[in-house]
Image (cartoon, rainbow, N blue to C red):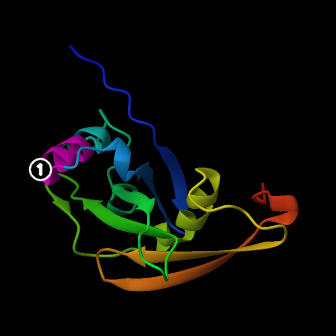
């Protein structure tokens, strides 16, 4: 058996939770990427006990992120919904809950440089072709998390 290490950050956004990946860490081929996401989440097993999914559509999601080449965006992202109990990955919907984690991920992974007080992160959604902006508290150029 071959082990494959793929960096990701599992984050909660609103009522959703899932892994966030740099696009460069995943296969460029869509079929290979989707096969990998299914395996990581644990689908098509309805309980997803062999993966990091939680057996629910709210915990069977992923975001794939890259630096944007657009002048009006810092990052591009693709939302992927992994179907529970089915061997399918759907990249046609969007998820506002996971979006709540995205700007922090971009700052944490160095895709966006944190400003001294508030950091503006401009995110282009590849699913809907819409631009979203987030203002993230970054006192002393650090992410602020309430624990």
Query: In terms of depth relative to the viewer, which is nearer, 109 or 94?
Result: 109
The image shows a total of numbered marks equal to 1
Quadrant where the N terminus is found in the figure: top left
* Chief secondary structure of the magenta portion: helix
Does the magenta-highlighted stretch encompass residue 5?
Answer: no
The residue singled out by tag 1 in the image is 31
Q: Quadrant of the C terminus?
A: bottom right
User: Is residue 86 visible in the rendered structure shown here?
Assistant: no
Q: Is residue 141 above or below residue 48?
A: below
Measured as percent of width and height from the top left, residue 83 is found at 21, 58
Q: Can you give x and y, in whole percent of width and height, for residue 101 in the image?
A: 56, 64
Q: Residue at x 49, y 71 (%)?
A: 99
Q: Residue furthest bottom?
A: 130
The answer to if 35 sits in the magenta stretch is yes
Residue 131 falls in which quadrant of the image?
bottom left
Please report the residue visible at 61 percent of the width from the left and 78 percent of the height from the top: 134
Q: Is residue 111 left or right of residue 78?
A: right
Report the span colored magenta: 29-38
Q: Residue at x 79, y 65 (%)?
A: 138
Q: Is residue 105 above or below residue 126?
A: above
Horizontally, residue 13 falls left or right of residue 118, namely left
Residues packed near mark 1 inside 10 Å, few (<14), some (14 to 19) or many (20 plus): few
Which residue shows up at 53% across the image and 64% down it? 102
Residue 90: x %, y % from top left? 20, 65
Q: Secondary structure at mark 1?
A: helix
């Amino acid at each position: 058996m071959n082990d494959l290490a793929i960096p990701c950050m599992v984050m909660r956004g609103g009522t959703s939770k899932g892994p966030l990946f740099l696009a460069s860490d995943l296969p460029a081929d869509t079929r290979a990427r989707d096969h990998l996401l299914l395996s990581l989440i644990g689908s098509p097993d309805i309980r997803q006990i062999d993966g990091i999914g939680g057996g629910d559509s709210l915990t069977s999601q992923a975001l794939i992120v890259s630096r944007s080449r657009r002048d009006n965006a810092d990052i591009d992202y693709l939302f992927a919904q992994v179907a529970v109990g089915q061997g399918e990955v759907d990249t046609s919907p969007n998820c506002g809950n996971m979006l709540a984690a995205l700007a922090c991920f971009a700052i944490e992974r160095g895709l966006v440089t944190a400003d001294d007080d508030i950091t503006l992160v401009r995110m282009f959604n590849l699913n809907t072709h819409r631009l979203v902006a987030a203002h993230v508290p970054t006192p002393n150029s650090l992410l602020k998390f309430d624990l």
